Image (cartoon, helix red, strand yellow):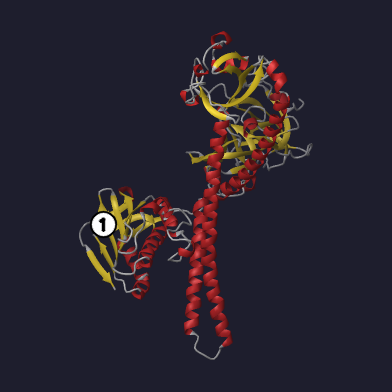
Amino acid sequence: MHASPIEQVRTDADENSVPDRIGDTVLVQGRALVRPGALPDSSLIFMQDATAGLAVQLPEGPNVRRGDSLLVRGVVEHQYGLTRIRGLDYRRVATMTDYPSPVPLPVTAAAGESYEGRLVRVRGKVIVNRTNDGGQYVLLEDEAENAEARLAVFVPNRRLDEIDLSSFGPGAEIAVTGVLSQHDRSAPYDDAYQVLPRDQVDLEETSFMSGYYQSIIILIIAGAILAATVVFTLRVAVRRRTQQLTESRARFRRLAEATFEGILLHENGKILDVNRALTDMSGYSRQELLGCDVGTIFSDATHNSSPEGTMERTTSPYESVMVPKRGDRFPVEIEEKEVDLADRDVEVVALRNITERKKREKELLQAKEEAENMARLKSSLLNNMSHELRTPVTSIIGYAELIVEEPDIDHTEFATHIQQSGKRLSRTLQAVLDMAKLDSGTIRVSEERVHIASLLREVVNEHRPFASEKGLPIRMDTQGAIALRTDRVLLRRSVSTLVHNAIKFTDEGRVDVTVEPAASGVRIAVADTGIGIAADFRTDLFEPFKQESEGRTRTHQGTGLGLALTKRRIELIGGAIEVESRKGDGSTFTLEFPARLVIEASAAGASSSEIA
């Protein structure tokens, strides 16, 4: 019995997605693509020869490693859409062919019968990352718009410690190498294709940046492309207009057939002739238009106040609205020119449907506004970061030079200034790093039992020296014993930012920190009697690198990242943040957490403390 090519075993002459040789005992030879135990079915491997690939369920026998050349005798089966051989016996043989290289495929080509059982390399964009009873999987689609094909990348539960899919979130672009399999429970078995990676190196993320920074690059490139397009369009328009003027006399003689623009001739508003393009645009026949007033096909906005005519008399193009016989009105561009025709002065009017151009102009305007917003954001970012980096570095260098130049005096004060500048620089860098982590989605929430009163006391004590320097008391009220199941580090940083801001922007009065049960769960509030927030700045309050006072008028230091980080952290752990403020009357920032996060919320044992 001679070994059959795998392609012959997979033959499906009637094209019903089921091989014709079901139940036949066959002999095949090929290279093992995976070792036993590496797939969801631990007894299943895939082997491939020069013609095709095939799943094989091995019986008891010699150990098999990836790359071994095998000679297998077994029965052809078809299960869950997958063509396979139930092995009766097998043995390793001398290597007859090279180990196959993966076939590069898009998702659309991989999600089909042609490459089933082969080693493939598929590129695609992640649309979902989920788990089920059997393991973890991501769904891929092609990067092209309107792509419909889907392909799963699946890792069974017992191999999740070896192969990690959790880092590939929606929107990530990845390349995966593995065996193309299928797990379809119903005919016609043309769905549920999946790639089974062999190890972690088979997975590779090909997207080079997070969404935020990638968007910046895309906007810059889009701006350059738009500028080039505008220049090209203007040049084309100039050349086209020059050609139109050169051929105008001949075009007028062949009015009915010479142009795709709508053209009409009128004398004092009475239509003398029209071309076919105009009848197509308006829906009226030529006979219906001859002798009519031009107002028949134009809206009232086109008419001027002169009793001698019903259209504007100008040599410059202008826009109007055409009123067709049937259908919706649409914008047109109109050009008029007075010509001598049989000793009569008549107006030649050219009309163009500019619906698409209007749409493009709107898109260009939106792109321009987005580019301007990005430019303002970049300017604000550079200004803030330049100040926040240059100021502490200058202080550190200056005091360090004083220590070197005057080594014999007490340097405690200089060292204190260096320490403060170093901490400020560290806070600036940490804020930028935290924002990058939040944008990239790499911050993980670690939930634990958090006693809110204890956490607030830590934050208040930490800010005691800062408040004392400004002569501000901090009052803390806790209503009962309250505990949440949340991430302690993220919650503490968020509350710390609010307390720090309250002290920084308050020169007289006090700062109140309260926590109390609420109908919806638990509410933490930080209130101050400081400078407050203007109403027109509320929409930008939680935007990164935005500050109410900027540039030379800036009154307080900072990167403009504190509240943006706080909002994202609170939302990440399941809470929400609100603000109430009036310019000059202080501000109150409220953090609300739903009941599902509350572990304990008793009203007894209320306490209050005031810190000077």
Q: Quadrant of residue 265?
A: top right
Q: Residue 301 at what x, y percent from top left?
A: 47, 26
In the displayed structure, does residue 19 sit left or right of residue 563? right
Q: Nearer the viewer, residue 45 or 451?
A: 451
Q: How many numbered tags mark residues here?
A: 1
Identify the image quadrant of the C terminus. Answer: bottom left
Tell me if I can see residue 476 in this picture.
yes
Q: Residue at x 55, y 44 (%)?
A: 368
Q: Quadrant of residue 272?
A: top right
Instruction: Label 1, secondary structure: give it.
Output: strand
Q: Residue 3 at what x, y percent from top left?
A: 75, 28
Tell me if I can see residue 162 in this picture.
no
Identify the image quadrant of the N terminus. Answer: top right
The residue under label 1 is which amino acid type? Glu
In the displayed structure, does residue 329 sit left or right of residue 147? left
Q: Which residue is mark 1?
A: 516
Q: Residue at x 53, y 36 (%)?
A: 362
Q: Is residue 372 above or below residue 426?
A: above
Q: Nearer the viewer, residue 127 or 180?
A: 127
In the displayed structure, does residue 467 sit left or right of residue 35? left
Q: Residue furthest front?
A: 343
Mark 1 crowd level (few <14, some 14–19, many ≥20, 10 Å Cα):
many
In the displayed structure, does residue 72 sit left or right of residue 612? right
Q: Residue 181 at what x, y percent from top left?
A: 61, 33
Q: Residue furthest bottom?
A: 408
Q: Is residue 65 above or below residue 14?
A: below
Q: Residue at x 26, y 60 (%)?
A: 481
Q: Is residue 206 above or below residue 19?
A: below
